[in-house]
Image: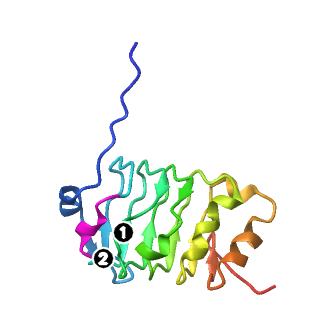
Amino acid sequence: KPLPVRLTMRLNADLIARSPAYLNALKDRELDLRGNKISAIENLAACQNQFDSIDLSDNEIRKLECMAVLPRLKMLLLAHNRISRLAERLSEAFPGLETLVLTDNSFAQLSELSPLAGLPSLTSLSLVDNPVTKQQGYRHYVIARLPKLRVLDFKRVTTS
């Protein structure tokens, strides 16, 4: 019996143009790319930096990277993917990123989270349901590297 073929979709200008875009609950312009079996973040320059939020949840992305520069982007939703790697220069692509949701991905080691320190505006981060959250010292490690962080895994960051 043949193995089932896993079809993945390319993130291209056509998919971006056909995807729903709307004002979300925060009155931010959001692009909805959920559930498209996208395997890589590419061609986001086609967004022409017109979105405050991009939802790439429920896809098959393995690495968070972006060649486009999107200074307007404040929120990136990447829950339920397969991400275990982060590009080193995320701040160049997302200089204004404030909220990053990486819930239910594949981060296993604390060192895999190091590139997050390069995101100067990050105030809210979720890594819930990633194996790394069970590592000893996880919360302290993340908070120490992200001085502006106010919310980690939907819990307030306190000074104590």
Q: Which mark is residue 6?
A: none
Residues at circles 1 and 2 in contact by the CB criterion of under 8 Å: yes
**Residue 75 placement (x, y as % from top left):** 43, 75
User: At label 1, which amino acid type do we have?
Assistant: Ile
- Residue reaching furthest to the top: 1
**Position of 94 relative to 127 (above/below):** below
The answer to if 46 sits in the magenta stretch is yes
Across and down, in percent, residue 151 comes to 62, 78
Q: Residue placed at 49% from the left, 80% from the top? A: 98
- What is the x, y in percent for residue 78? 46, 61
Question: Seen in the image, is 42 located left or right of residue 105?
Answer: left
Q: Quadrant of the N terminus?
A: top left
The disc placed on residue 51 is 2
Residue bearing the label numbered 1: 54
User: For numbered disc 1, what is the local secondary structure?
Assistant: strand
Residue 109 image offset from top left, x and y in percent? 69, 55
- 92 relative to 65, above or below: below
On the question of residue 45 being in view, the answer is: yes
Look at the picture and state if 33 lies above or below 156: above
Magenta region: 42-48
The picture quadrant where one finds residue 26 is: bottom left
Label 1, residues with CA under 10 Å away: few <14, some 14-19, many ≥20? many
